Amino acid sequence: MAESQHYVLHVNGMPHEVGDAWVGESLLYVLRERLGLTGSKGACEQGECGSCSVLIDGELICSCLVLAASATDQEIVTIEGIAPVGSPTDVQDAFVEFGAVQCGFCTPGLIMAAHALLERTPQPSETEIREELSGNICRCTGYGRIIEAVQRVAVSRTDQR
Amino acid sequence: MSTATREGVVRGRLGDSPPRPDGVAKVQGSFAFSGDLSADGFLWGATLRSPHPYARIVRIDVTPAWRIDGVAAIVTAEDVPGKLTYGLISSDQPVFASDVVRYVGEPIAAVAADHPETCRRALAAIVVEYEVLAPLTDPERAIDGSHPPIHALGNLIRHQRIVTGDQSLVGEVVVEGTYELGMQDQAFLGLEAALALPDPGGAGVELFVATQWLHEDRTQIAACLDLAPDKVRLTLGGVGGAFGAREDISLQVHTCLLALRTGRPVRLAYSREESFLGHVHRHPARIWMRHHATEQGVIQRIEARMVFDGGAYASTSSAVLINAVTHAQGPYKCVNAIVDGYAVRTNNLPCGAMRGFGVVQACFAHEGQMDKLAATCGLDPVEIRLLNAMETGDALITGQVIENVAPVAECIRRTAALPLPTEPVGGRDGNPLHLPGGAGLTADVSHIRRGIGWGVAIKNLMYSEGFDDFSTARCRLADGVASLKFATSEVGQGFVVLAPQIARSVLGVDDVLLEPIDTTIGSAGSTSASRQTWMSGGAIDGACRLVRERMFEHVGARNDIDPVRLAIDGRDIVDTMGSFRVSVVEATAGLAFEETFEHHHRPTEELDENGQGNCHTAFVFVAHRAVVDVDPELGLVKVVQIATAQDVGVALNPMSVMGQIEGGIAQGLGLAVMEEIVLTDGLVRNASFTDYLLPTMLDMPTVVATMIEIPDPMAPLGAKGVGEPPCISSTPAIVAAIRDAIGRDLSRVPVRPADICLP
């Protein structure tokens, strides 16, 4: 395609060259289709559902709303960069153990959001959990088990201190 | 039965809540959904859709699209090699529209190209000349015949009447109402996506797709491609939710056709807007009901007229309608009734399956009626429902006797016994998020009114009207490890966790492997109608029991013990009349037993012209109580709590059951106060998540739930389906609570702010 670009993205601590990419590609598209990082999901394409959440310079962002070619000088962390395959984090373990996962499509985005929440607010109230995670839509669970999983992690992190 | 052995207890048996086998992959982002699948040298596919709800296609010119670099294929109706139409019940929907388009978003062509952007440009370059026609959007005009047929099969998809008992009876008390429901979208998060791999020379095709029913898809795809069914192989791509919207074909034929045409793998995926247009929805409905009762509130006769807008194509409309008319009485005794139901064709979006399948609509109406009856008779909502509660042995208005466990009164009583919320309006911490309108900071605590409302439901399980419904499963036990094979679609509900639980319980093994979910085994039927625990659970149970019999025969012969004396105890095979004990692992070392089982449910009948007949398989019951806070001036609602007691038979996996209860309630809440696809003259106004509002974590209330566990003797594992009931009577309960808060007669869902605050 005519409007092609070459650039470098810093994802999960590694530089990734992106070559011959159409300039209109979103960060979500490039992560998934060019870098093979399909853990970030696209469900609304307009920043409403949170399924594509990644960290950009530590901030939780919908990657569907970011032009990939504009994210070149930033540190991007995706679900694949949260923990190695087969070694889930405490949040990931809690989601499985307490039934926060059904179809799982919203899950990577919620894991990113839950980690970000617990970073900022290690002991969130239920209201804080609901507010902070309200940008992530889940259609299967009705959220009850997700709230419980996040609460369990907060408690277990305190117990370990 | 004790599960203790020398080695301890087998974990993850029936009744436990073991972790999902796909859980770690899902939380780590490594689980492959259908939209994540790729293949070397693949092309992107995309679909050209009609901008008009009703128009004649005068001309299609695809040549400008061929001039775009990177375009590899363009297909229209002319390129469909086999049957030009498809459909679950009636084959009335074109693979591509060629002469006329009947709804906004109807596919006209598909392209394959090297990049999604190339696809978009190619679609934009295709010229379609239309002669725009006046759309049929009023279902009544489809019934009265005042609009010319928009389809060769006519505008009436089905009319079904139920007439039973004394038609002249007039009650001492008569209440009536007209109830309306908007069009709800399933709004699963994982958009429609598929990957098709062509066989060399176009002899066949392999499709990875997110679907509810692999074998039915295969039948329809093969017919349209003019291929033998065994030349079309389907494997389940990871499914990001379904809720009914994946029961019909959407992109399956298009993807295969593009792959066969190009000889290359093709990926096709819908955008969110396309998803709203490209799958079937919950039927909008208008229901009139009149209840006759004694002064004391005993229901004597029901009259009803139900109109379901099926949209442009039939899909499952006729089955949805049957569910609605046969559930018109709700979970209440009634012997006299006349019900007329119509499913009609219009130029609105096609409607079909969505969780609750016709019963959601009926329940919203009958529960509105129950509250009217209660008010007229001076009873409260609980009293009127207990007074009329159906029991095992009662007959439906179809004449069918309820043979299942029917704990309607218990559902109501146990729900009523659940604690009401103790927080005051606005919560204890004064956080505005607890108020209607939330972060908008619009509501003032002093203006808020709290209300309580009830909903109770009956729902049929499995398929109806004579359909020979079955599911197939295979179990292989070798060296103490079981492997299970089935074609049951895992859409999130957790069959992949339940199936191993069954195998562990029957066979006394720890390790259970799951083989790929595909069409290399017999059909499992659809993951819908709350049927897979019963049907595929029954099939897994049956296959595992056959394997156990073979194993017992072998062990018995070897040890000179009559196999009928053998049983599983923990991880061991034991002689129930002696001291013999051997572990399953040891007993099966170097051996393999394999059995396949097909579970069929009992036969059902079609309804006769008076709507009489044993058309359903089994029934389940549920009650909901909603507490809401309403700002009557701004029309804002905050659902504070939902309490529910659900008839589950046996909770085979309590955590999964709870997940179904909470998830279903979220969808019921959505229909009550948020979700509607808004159509104006057949045009869709809100095909996006910005404009079609789904419940978030802030919208969801606390759920307090009780599972009523009375094993159903008719169910293979004693367990009833649990998926649909939570979203059926939660909706009327919430609306009743709003009525209770503001004292107004609300008759339409979703309840909009204007319905609450404007005269």
Image (cartoon, coloured by chain):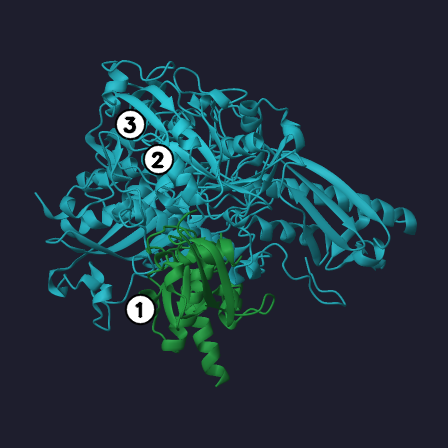
Would you place residue B690 above or below residue A153 in this image? Answer: above
Residue type beneath disc 1: Thr
Q: Residues within 10 Å of mark 3 (few under 14, many from 20)?
A: many
| Residue that badge 3 annotates | B53
C-alpha span from label 2 to label 3 = 19 Å
Q: Nearer the viewer, mark 1 or mark 2?
A: 2
| Residue that badge 1 annotates | A127
**Picture quadrant where residue B31 is located:** bottom right
**Picture quadrant where residue B718 is located:** top right
Residue for point 38% across, 17% down: B610
Q: Nearer the viewer, residue B688 or B480?
A: B688
> In terms of secondary structure, where does tag 3 sit?
loop
- Residue B581 in the image: state x and y as whole percent: 83, 59
Q: Nearer the viewer, mark 1 or mark 3?
A: 3
Per the rendering, the colour in which chain B appears is cyan
- What chain is tagged by disc 3? B
Q: Nearer the viewer, residue A113 or B640?
A: A113
Residue type beneath disc 2: Ala
Say yes or no: labels 1 and 2 on the same chain.
no
C-alpha span from label 1 to label 2 = 47 Å
Left or right of residue B256, residue B516 in this image: right
Would you place residue A74 above or below residue B739 in this image? Answer: below
Residue type beneath disc 3: Pro
- Residue A133 in the image: state x and y as whole percent: 35, 64
Residue B287 is labelled as none
**What is the residue that sits farthest to the bottom in this orientation?**
A161
Residue B124 is labelled as 2
Say yes or no: labels 1 and 3 on the same chain.
no
- Residue B262 in the image: state x and y as whole percent: 56, 33
